[in-house]
Amino acid sequence: MTMVRNARCHCGEVRFTVEFPDDTLRGSRCNCTICAMKGAVMVYVPREAVTVTQGEHSLACYSFNTGAAKHHFCKTCGIHCFHRPRSDPDLYAVNAATLEGVRPYEDFPEVSVNNGQQHQLDNEGVRLLAGTLRFTPSPDGKWPHEGW
């Protein structure tokens, strides 16, 4: 049974659907230079599972280093929507925060972080884990350092 989720950038200019093989979302992060800066939890799907339904003209693409990875983001609000990873160009890594009904912190309280600084294509095909990121909600919902 597949599940289709609607997704969009922050401003709503870019909208897309993502078809998942089931209702289980498995997220991960990466510590390569761009992923560490964007800080998004990514959910991997086959490329054909992503369909842009609005605003394709508003998608920009960023690529660097080997040029294999293609990072698609909204030109208006700057939100990273999805990218074609260097490690598997037949997939899209979708920013989980763009998915309707997904709460990236609550829904992914523990996320594995792939070691993209020692990328598997530069490391004899060995995929390394950099660590695990954990989110622990504040018991009272307040910012721990009032006055910041």
Image (cartoon, grey):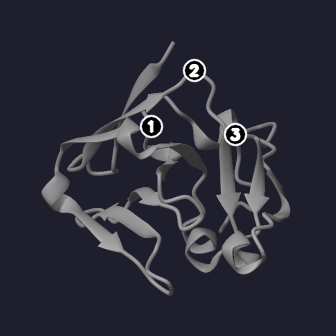
**Do callouts 2 and 3 mark residues in contact (Cβ within 8 Å)?**
no
CA–CA distance in space, label 1 to label 2: 13 Å
Q: Is residue 65 above or below residue 115?
A: below
Q: Name the residue at 75% across, 40% down.
A: 109
CA–CA distance in space, label 2 to label 3: 14 Å
Give the label on residue 23, or none: 2
**Do callouts 1 and 2 mark residues in contact (Cβ within 8 Å)?**
no
Q: Quadrant of residue 43?
A: top right
Q: Secondary structure at mark 2?
A: loop
Q: Is residue 32 above or below residue 14?
A: below
Q: For mark 3, does the 10 Å Cα neighbourhood hold few (<14), some (14 to 19), or many (20 or more) residues?
A: some
Q: For mark 2, does the 10 Å Cα neighbourhood hold few (<14), some (14 to 19), or many (20 or more) residues?
A: few
The amino acid type of the residue labelled 2 equals: Asp
**Total labels drawn:** 3
The amino acid type of the residue labelled 1 equals: Leu
Q: Secondary structure at mark 3?
A: loop
Query: Furthest-top residue in view?
Result: 1
Closer to us: 52 or 88: 88
Q: Is residue 144 visible?
A: no
Give the side of residue 88 with respect to residue 143, left or right: left
Residue topped by disc 3: 108
Give the side of residue 87 with respect to residue 6, left or right: right
CA–CA distance in space, label 1 to label 3: 13 Å
Residue topped by disc 1: 99
